[in-house]
Image (cartoon, grey):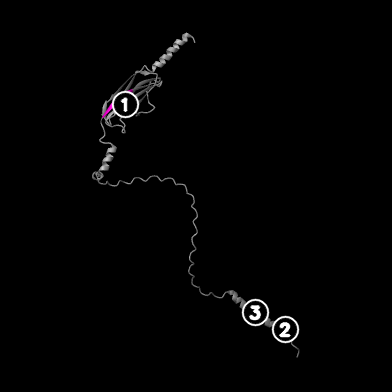
Amino acid sequence: MNKRMFLPLLFMVLCTVTVAFCYDYDYEVMPGEGAYDQPIYLMVRVDPLIDSQNMHVRVFWNKRCITDIKGIPSPIYLKTQYIHKWDLTITPPITDNGVGEHKIEIWLETAAGDIRKLTYDYEIIEGPLTTVEAWEQFIEENPGLLEQITGPRGEKGATGATGQKGEKGTKGDAGAVGSQGPVGVPGITGMQGPTGKTGATTSYLVTGAISLVFTLASVVFTVYWTRRPEP
């Protein structure tokens, strides 16, 4: 490699490496102490305040991240540059806000991945009246207390509006056919009806029989008459 090219490249590499370590950091925590629910203001500044490299800040409370875990980026300044200033407000987590000292950590990460940690010992000087566990234990030891402090039952509230009718459900599968029941007891025989009149067929038979008798009598008489001897 040409020596004339080597020296400028080496200078650029050294500048790139040292850029990540040439920032000065400053911060303020206000107020320096407070109650368990006191909002805490954090003012974070970096020098140089404006450059072309982005940064991200994270805030931890007793090793627990209470900001976006990905980090809050530097605000954009003039499109291609960033301004390294953050004004943050945090509140002690309700699960870790007991009276005593707590550690606040501010992590500043450069675009190259280098992290600078700024720490502050914050003291909570006024905590909750009691913990949930202590209250539950007190109630368990004094079971009649709730009855003494419970007020009268309030009036029934107004009925709410009827909700929208839900969608009709799908039809279920047909059930199995049940077993056949036992044969029922025979019913009582009904009363016999009145005797009916003779039908037309009987009259026709009697009339035919009479006609047949007269016909046979006529034939016998004719035969006898024709065959009798002459006097």
Q: CA distance from mark 3 to mark 1?
A: 139 Å
Find the residue positioned furthest to the right: 230
Quadrant of image for the C terminus: bottom right
| Residue 39 image position (x, y, % from top left) | 29, 29
Q: Quadrant of residue 138?
A: top left
Q: Are marks 3 and 1 in contact (CB under 8 Å)?
A: no
Residue type highlighted by circle 2: Val
The answer to which of 85 and 175 lies nearer the viewer is 175
Which residue shows up at 65% across the image and 81% down it?
213
At label 1, counting other C-alpha atoms closer than 10 Å, the crowd grade (few under 14, some 14-19, many 20 or more) is many
Q: Secondary structure at mark 3?
A: helix
- Among the two numbered marks 3 and 1 on one chain, the one whose residue lies closer to the N terminus: 1
- Element marked by disc 1: strand
Up the image or down, 26 lies above or below 195; here it is above
Q: Position of residue 174 (x, y in %)?
A: 49, 51
Amino acid residing under circle 1: Ile
Question: Residue 223, labelled with which disc?
Answer: 2
Q: CA distance from mark 2 to mark 3?
A: 19 Å
Above or below — where is 36 with respect to 206? above
Q: Position of residue 132 (x, y in %)?
A: 29, 37
Q: Which stretch is magenta?
A: 118-124
Image location of residue 161, percent across then percent down: 35, 45
Instruction: Name the residue: 29% across, 38% down.
Output: 133
Q: Which mark is residue 63?
A: none
Find disc 1 in the rendering and name its residue. Answer: 104
Q: Give the residue type that dot 3 points to.
A: Ser
Q: Report the disc number at residue 211.
A: 3
Give the residue furthest to the bottom: 231
